[in-house]
Amino acid sequence: MSDKERKFLRQSKWKRLTRQRWFYPTLYIGLVAVVLAGVMIYQFNAADDTAEENANDYSWNVEQNDLIENSEENAAEVVAEQEDLVMPVMLGDKTEILTQYYDADAAEEDQLDALIFYNNQYYQSKGVDITSSDGEPFEVIASLTGKVKSVKDDELLGKVVEMEHDGERATMYGSLSEVYVSEGDELTQGDPLGLSGANVYTDEEISKVHFRLMEEGQPVNPGFK
């Protein structure tokens, strides 16, 4: 058989095949099956990629949440360690302030009340003089938890106790007649440290405490009213 005859024979078989009723439906179904298989493979791969991305996002979110929680916990610890300042007395409604802290931003009337007249000169008060309404001696307490830095006698302020606290804060308690503590003692906020007394620049007949709050070595307004 020649090549021409073989080619003619193959074309005849193909024509007979395409004339069968089932040929085109079968061909169509096959093509649809191939397309569907391609779509399913694509969706499966896309689902895998999405799952991987979600897993990565979840891991990142977990790490970020852990960082946020740790930061919040650390911040809470810092806040918890920073005590609120309290008055160095426990006189309740018998508490009276003789001399306020001199605040450069305060009203003129308040600034006048914060001036100390001593030795024919006026001085700006760096602290607060506190007394009792009856003028009688009273216990002086630690305004903050901390350590006694020094105990000394001062020519103007009498017996003085200095304390140091967290956050570069320090407190001073002057005009004491008695001191209960020694250098190096650890005190909790509210612990008694001495007894009120007198100083030379205010009425020596009135028992009082001269209190100062320092931050980074500088006196600041304690905000007592």
Image (cartoon, rainbow, N blue to C red):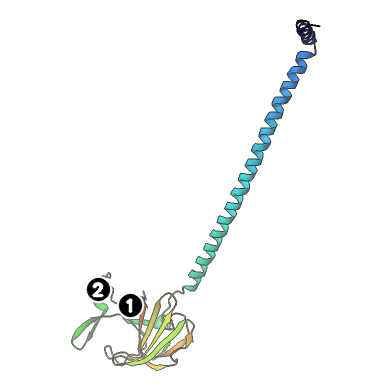
Residue 52's quadrant in the figure? top right
Q: Residues within 10 Å of mark 2 (few under 14, many from 20)?
A: few
Label 2, on which residue? 109
Q: CA distance from mark 2 to mark 1?
A: 21 Å
Q: Which mark is residue 219?
A: 1
In x, y percent, where is residue 221? 34, 75
Q: Which residue is at a point 66% across and 33% down the rendered structure image?
A: 42
Q: Secondary structure at mark 2?
A: helix
Give the total number of marks visible in the rendering. Answer: 2
The picture places residue 199, in percent across and down from the top left corner, at 30, 90
Residue 68: x and y in percent read 53, 59
Q: Amino acid at mark 2?
A: Glu
Asked if 171 appears above or below 11 in the picture, the reply is: below
Q: Quadrant of the C terminus?
A: bottom left
Query: What residue occupies the far front of the structure in this picture?
Result: 2
Q: Inspect this view and state whether residue 123 appears.
A: yes
Q: Secondary structure at mark 1?
A: strand
Against 225, is 37 above or below?
A: above
Q: Nearer the viewer, residue 131 or 49?
A: 49
Residue 123 drawn above or below residue 67:
below
